[in-house]
Amino acid sequence: MHSSTSNFERVIPALPWRGITVAVCVFALIAVAAWEIHCRAVGYEPTLNDTEDLWAEARRRVEPESIVIIGDSRAWFDSDLDELERGLGQRPVQLALPGSCAYPVLADLADDPHFHGTIICSVVPRIFFAPGGPPVEHSEKAVRRYHGQTWAQRASHYLSVPLEQSFAFLKQDDLALEELLKDLPIPDRPYAQVPPRAPPYFCSIDRERRARMVEQCARPGPLQEKVKSRWTRLFTPPRPPKFVPKEIFEAKIAEAIEARYRNTKIAVDKLRARGGKIVFVRFPLSGDLKVYEDRATPRAKTWDPLLRQTGAPGVYFEDYPELSGFNCPEWSHLSAGDSVEFSKRLVPHLRAALQL
Amino acid sequence: MLFNSLTFVVFFLVVLAAYWTMRSWEARKNLLLVASYIFYGAWNPPFAALLFATTALDFYLGRKMGKLHEPRQRRLWLIISVAVNLSMLGFFKYGNFLLENFQWVLARGGIQYKPPHLDVFLPIGISFYTFHSLSYTLDIYRGVMRPTRSLRDFTLAVSFFPQLVAGPIVRAGDFLPQLDAPPKPLKGRFLWGLALMTLGLFEKVVLADTILAGSADRVFGYEGPLIALDSWMGVMAFAGQIFFDFAGYSTCAIGAALCLGFHLKDNFRFPYAAIGFSDFWRRWHISLSTFLRDYLYIPLGGNRLGAARAMINLIIVMFIGGLWHGAAWTFVVWGLLHGSYLALERLVKAFVKKDAAWANNLGVKLLAGLGTYVAVLIAWVYFRASDFGVASRLIGGMFGRHPTGDALLSTREMLQVGIVTFFLLAAHWSLRDISIETAVERLPRWVVTTAWFLMACAIILTQGSSNAFIYFQF
């Protein structure tokens, strides 16, 4: 017998709990069904969420000699894995992350002693050379999840996949409560530092993390316009902080960009020392976004020095007529159909750059 | 395994089904023990071995102590238990902190020494289970309980999964008696447990993570000075976030335990309606404050050795309480602030008549409550800030030292913080003298049904895009 020091017993509220529970379950089922019907009616389809766990699952598929795609959303949308597999002889692993800097993933692969495969690295200068903030943090979080994923997180991921494949309302980036609240039309104070919103749902994702633009976005219409308008804000750099003198701030940014060049070279050298290969790729873009990127991050100040400093080969879509004729419906990515054709045409250039 | 994860939903359903299907009480306890170790091992399996080592040692030392009558010998075994438990906690939690401070002290003396960084992971929930386990040997030493003969029962008491990683700190003396016999049937216990789990999850995933965490993170992560409005909003957001996060976990734990037929005590009792700081600590993290009271404050002499000594004791206890939360001087300052608040309150009370009519005036009570809340907010700044630079910048902002500082938050974020804080304070004030059970019992059925339904829908709408519980890091 234990020596009892406590006979504590919680009070149970005297209510008809069985009836209440049944009512709650029935109402909740009806509400969820109604919400699902509404989400489908406004254009959502069941698709996977591009979570850190899905990324970690893809990262685990990387073998020592794999071909790996890293970088931002352009590599994510525009790379058709079937075409690349046909052309390169091996199915690539898709590790590009939307809105994210490739460097943390590149550094992680370069530090992986088992990896001596091939990297196809997308470069959007504004994102690749981001000194910090969400583009870098997003990639770092994914890498951290891969290295520190617990069994429980992995199990939750496997359980969530069939649910996300069945229900349209399980779209975290758009339809989670937090995102719905962000959509409330409430005006802000003029100088409030409100981060720009990411574009709404305009792609589907499969288990290999292959992103395909949805049809509503590929054709002219309100969704396409909405996505375009979001790019303008997302690609506009935030105001420099008031609390740091302008020259010091600019010097810090310049230093961070220099460090990115330096560290990229170190990572590329490490990879090559083990027999690995890398090719940088500039994927297509169009419209106002292209005008803006060409002006804000000109090739001569970003792409060219990157290739020069790392000594790595590169494929710039504008250098080749067969790659430059594509139109990005929302300025930044190719439609699902065009991404297949683009990938097919990209293959010979990748083979030449990588000397395959 | 997080309560707010699909893995836990499946795990809990399987455990519940197996538990209530088994007839043998011994088999059910075995099942709970295995389930608890799976729950814990799902984070990092090797740490389950550490958990077992701590438990087995205290079981052994408890038995040793139970056989002895000589106080000196009993004290020796207690010292071993306390030393081993605290050394383990110290190594994992405070190793690097101590080395860094040692380096700083040497540098002040002109000695340059760079200690190696200890590359150790902090075992999740170590602060909680160390206290669960330690309460056993401490209570045996105090003569409050006799040692158990079952290692399995004691192991289950320490590792019982609902309360294992973030409390409440359940004392062995409260839990072991419940293992003597299977729980008696109690009408509504299981479903009330589920309702409490829904409430706890709603507090955590909807209120803490979805509504408040973003504003708190942005304000505390900002590197520049902020105007007063944004500073206060950020701190109020954190005050709400930490309450809903931690109280949410405790409520889930209590609910999950009830579903299995076990009764855990309250860990929170509407703390933001506290009038004064001793009242606050009777309402906030009750299992920790009573632990520190019984095992530290009273052994130090409590208030038996005069007013001055009592005040010093309060400060010592809160210093330890601050350090328990994390290996950083900011936590120590948070603890010391609360210690000073408590000491000051004791001083004020010495000059105020207990039954003074004006002290019971509602206006005075509200004012005192508001004062307590503001003082608690100021202390939270040190708890949440990553360093003293951030803390002092934010305190400066709160008190108008940066009139030309930045405006950070969106109107939506401020509305979220303002509305939730208003309802949080209103709810705490209206419920401050009753329990959640009494409050629910007084409500019409349709209100209970609607509230439960809305909470469930809001949880589903968050889609699991939620964070780990704040108290896991402690």
Image (cartoon, coloured by chain):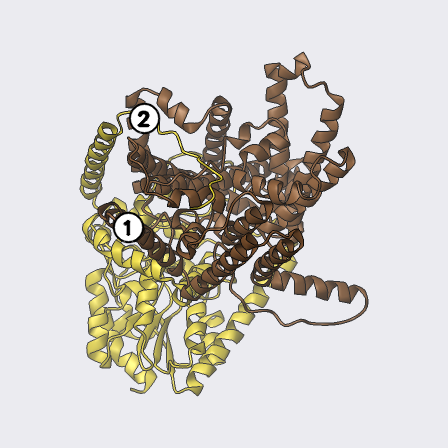
Q: What is the drawing colour of chain A?
A: yellow
For the point 49% across and 60% down, the residue is: B123
Q: Residues within 10 Å of mark 2 (few under 14, many from 20)?
A: some
Q: Is residue A82 left or right of residue B450?
A: left
Provide residue A182's location: percent of width, then percent of height: 39, 40
Viewer-side residue, A45 vs B318: B318
Provide residue B124's location: percent of width, then percent of height: 47, 57
Q: Is residue B136 visible?
A: yes
For the point 66% across and 12% down, the residue is: B357
Mark 2 or 1, which is nearer the eye?
A: 1
Q: Residues within 10 Å of mark 1 (few under 14, many from 20)?
A: some
The residue pinned by badge 1 equals: B15
- Distance, label 2 to label 1, CA atoms, is 27 Å
Which chain is displayed in brown in the rendered image? B
**Residue B1, located in which quarter of the rendered image?**
bottom left
Task: Name the residue type under label 2.
Answer: Val
Residue A252 to residue A227: above or below: below
Task: Name the residue type under label 1.
Answer: Val
The residue pinned by badge 2 equals: B448
- Comes first in the chain, label 2 or label 1: 1
